[in-house]
Image: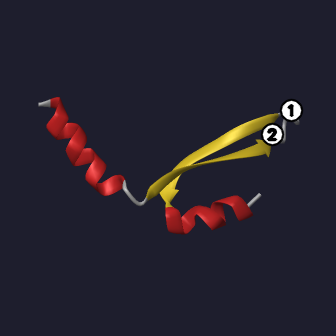
């Protein structure tokens, strides 16, 4: 039964990507990683914003 659930979840996620961006923390100045799952069309906007 688990195979059917996994297969049904994968149908809607083909156009999504995981984007990871390294950003400086305003409090400590150390680098942190910002991760988001989004559509491929929104990827450029994610990397342009600071």
Q: What element carries label 2?
A: loop
Report how many numbered discs are placed on residues in the image: 2
Q: Which quarter of the picture shows residue 29?
A: top right
Q: Which of 38 and 10 is in front in this view?
A: 10
Q: Going by the image, does 48 lie left or right of 19?
A: right
Q: Distance between the residues labelled 1 and 2?
A: 6 Å
Q: In which quarter of the image is the N terminus?
A: top left
Label placed on residue 28: 1
The correct choice, above or below, for 50 with respect to 6 in the image is below
In the rendered image, which residue does mark 2 sit on? 25
Q: Going by the image, does 50 lie left or right of 38?
A: right
Q: In which quarter of the image is the C terminus?
A: bottom right
Crowding at mark 1 (Cα within 10 Å: few <14, some 14-19, many 20+): few
Q: Are marks 1 and 2 in contact (CB under 8 Å)?
A: yes
The correct choice, above or below, for 18 with respect to 41 in the image is above
For image coordinates 69% across by 39% down, the residue present is 33
Crowding at mark 2 (Cα within 10 Å: few <14, some 14-19, many 20+): few
For image coordinates 66% across by 43% down, the residue present is 34
Q: Which quarter of the picture shows residue 23?
A: top right
């Amino acid at each position: 039964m688990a195979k059917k659930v996994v297969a049904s979840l994968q149908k809607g996620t083909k156009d999504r990507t995981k984007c990871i961006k390294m950003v400086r923390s305003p409090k400590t100045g150390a680098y942190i990683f910002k991760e988001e799952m989004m559509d491929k069309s929104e990827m450029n906007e994610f990397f342009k914003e600071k």
